[in-house]
């Protein structure tokens, strides 16, 4: 069973396993200056949500912790399309686009292979056009 899934990429205990997942939601309230008095603010809706995940791989010590897992996640990002992000309990977190992957290679052996790889991946929520967004805008319905 996977802990989380982004499109076809699974985050599992035997592989890229998340240590921490953080999310950020914003609501847009831009202000407009007025000649006299305080600025006026107007609600424009939900802003772009963000999701980030810290994970650790031990490619030399644990089976399933291959560096190729990071390559597979990069390939999902190279596709350039938003995909569903789903928790292990099948709760849909929303449609997200992979925006960055940061890697920290440490404990190098004599051949320069990392004993530990720290991974920080970030996603932005995909908001479709129209009120409420959702899948209808993504699929053109």
Image (tube, grey):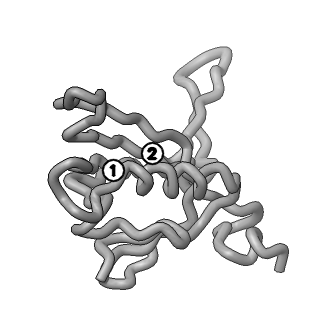
Which residue is identified by label 2?
122
Q: Is residue 73 left or right of residue 53?
A: right
Quadrant where the image shows the N terminus: bottom left
Relative to 90, residue 67 above or below: above
Which residue is rendered at x = 59% and y = 34% of the image?
Answer: 30
Inspect this view and state whether residue 93 appears. no
Q: Compare residues 4 and 69 and report the one nearer the observer.
A: 69
Relative to 16, residue 111 above or below: above
Which residue is rendered at x = 23% and y = 63% of the image?
Answer: 63
Mark 1 surroundings within 10 Å by alpha-carbon count, few (fewer than 14), some (14 through 19), many (20 or more): some
The label shown at residue 53 is 1
Which residue is rendered at x = 38% and y = 84% of the image?
Answer: 90
Of the two numbered discs 2 and 1 on the same chain, state the one appearing first in sequence.
1
Residue 4 in percent (x, y) is at 36, 70
Q: How many marks?
A: 2
Extreme residue in the top direction: 35
The secondary element bearing badge 1 is classed as strand
Q: Is residue 131 left or right of residue 77?
A: right
Residue 27 in percent (x, y) is at 50, 48
Q: Compare residues 21 and 18 and report the one nearer the observer.
A: 18
Q: Is residue 60 left or right of residue 96?
A: left
Mark 2 vs 1: CB contact within 8 A: yes
Extreme residue in the right direction: 140
Quadrant where the image shows the C terminus: bottom right
């Amino acid at each position: 069973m996977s802990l989380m899934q982004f499109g076809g990429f699974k985050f599992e205990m035997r592989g890229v396993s998340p240590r921490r997942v953080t999310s950020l939601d914003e609501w847009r309230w831009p202000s407009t200056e007025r000649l006299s008095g305080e600025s006026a603010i107007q609600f424009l809706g939900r802003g772009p949500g963000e999701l980030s995940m810290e994970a650790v791989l031990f490619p030399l010590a644990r089976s399933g912790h291959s560096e190729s897992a990071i390559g597979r996640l990069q390939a999902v990002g190279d596709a350039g399309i938003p995909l569903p992000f789903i928790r292990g309990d099948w709760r849909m977190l929303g449609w997200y686009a992979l925006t960055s992957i940061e890697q920290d290679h440490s404990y190098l052996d004599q051949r320069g292979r990392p004993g530990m790889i720290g991974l920080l991946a970030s996603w932005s929520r995909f908001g479709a056009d129209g009120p409420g967004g959702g899948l209808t805008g993504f699929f053109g319905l």
